[in-house]
Image (cartoon, rainbow, N blue to C red):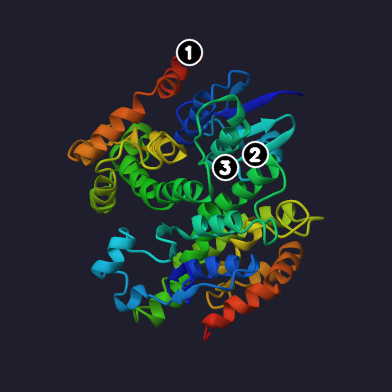
Amino acid sequence: MPKLTLHGTAISPYTRRVIMTLYEMGVEDFVHIPVSPLTGGTKTPDFIKMQPFARIPVLEDNGSIIYESRTLMRYVADKYMDQGPNLLGDTLMERALVNQWIDIEGHTFSPPVMILVYERVFKPHLHKRPCDEERWKDGREKLSRVLDIYEKHLEGRDYLVGNSFSLADLTHLPFTELLPAAGAFDLIESRPNVCRWWARISSRNAWKRTQQVEPYEF
Amino acid sequence: MGGVTLYGHPQSPYVRRALMAFYEMGVQDFDFKVVSSSKGDTKTDEYLAMNPFAKMPLLDDNGQYLYESRAIMRYIAEKHAGESSSDLVGKDPLERALVNQWVDVEGHSVTEQVAVVVEENFLKKLMGTGEPDKDRADAAKEKLARLFDVYEKHLEGREYLVGGRFTLADLTHLPYTELLPHAGAAELISSRPNMSKWWERISSRPAWKKVQQLEAKLS
């Protein structure tokens, strides 16, 4: 009986972040329960007992409960370090820079992406409400300023930190995947270094497998 | 240029987070360079060459630049772990994950709402940047109340968030929570006995007092 259980629909970018890390680290032996907040799955007493903030994803590991997708990706990379690649960073400073870019992703990169996704994807398809074009344009503007910095940083670099793929890159996969549907993938395509980086990290086998768990229809 | 320099303003909650890590780990040997975003210090070519996102705090460790306050606190805690009996990070993957989990809850759920309450009920008046939006503040307070209900339950029978001792999980909450009384929202904590005791415990640490006294010391 596998001791590892991941709760959360793979439709969620947050869950995708964790599945990607599991596959990258060569962890195949886990149970996946596709709980969805959209169908009330996160509001049941059993779920709230496990995750009192009522969010997905949640990881059950041999009786311990852990949540927050970026925590889970760090945990999987940490716990399975001996059997998989080092996604955390090779030196003390490299580890710090990986953490820095994970924070940039979480606090600076993803917020405008989430605005774009909310306005162009969630509102029309889930809430049957029209996109707020002004808010969407403002999101594009904010994301453009951020991507200008990424473009400069990625000059002469294959990855955000060091010479190999790390959690710094991985953490960007799920939200960037949604940019085409949000009408903003041109912001990636028009920046050669960012475009090259995106092509490299999104063509990883583990990412292709992650996408196949619940392919997006758009 | 050798040595360790932290750039920031002593009033910034993000800078205070980094400073707390330095003081908790007993690091004496660093320079603190005051920069002010309102004066444009973080937009100069020199600063942008170090942190292109134009934010504070910024760490210069012997020519290697590091930014994002939570990345800096983790770095300082890890770098000086051998010199101190304090283990702020966690002793095994599971404990490290639980510390990270609460840092993420703070960073992605709590602080966002505290920042709204502080902006509407405190900063706008202080900086003269506009009329407070009471509805926006009230909505944020309501969200905070729901989040703090979870904290209250979690802290039942616990002195700290993780591992029975002070860790980065507690530290990361200090700077923004400190501002709640200024925003007329102290009762969010004071009405919750477990949170009150936890807050009293972590905010009375000598290192936090040192952070609070830094600005007076500098002037």
B79 and A82: which one is in front? Answer: A82
Describe the element under mark 1 as helix, strand or loop.
helix
Q: Position of residue B25 (x, y in %)?
A: 53, 26
Badge 1 or badge 2: first in the primary sequence: 2
Q: Confirm whether residue A133 shows in the render.
A: no
Does label 1 or label 3 sit earlier along the sequence?
A: 3
Foreground disc of the pair 1, 3: 3
Image spot of residue A202 (x, y percent): 67, 72
Residue at image point 23% right, 39% down: B194
Find disc 3 in the rendering and name its residue: B71
Q: Where is residue B10 shown, x and y percent of the image? A: 48, 26
- Residue at 40 percent of width and 42 percent of height: B162
Q: Is residue B146 above or below residue A140?
A: above
The image shows residue A124, relative to residue A101, as above or below, that is below
- Mark 3 nearby-residue class (10 Å; few <14, some 14–19, many ≥20): many
In the picture shown, does residue A16 fall above or below B188?
A: below
Dot 2 falls on a residue whose secondary structure is: strand
Give the Cα distance between marks 3 and 2. 8 Å
Q: Residue at x 55, y 25 (%)?
A: B84
Q: In the rendered view, would you say B42 is above or below A155?
A: above
Q: Chain of mark 1?
A: B
Residue linked to disc 1: B217
Report x, y in % for residue B28.
Answer: 58, 18
Q: Are marks 1 and 3 in contact (CB under 8 Å)?
A: no
Q: Secondary structure at mark 3?
A: helix
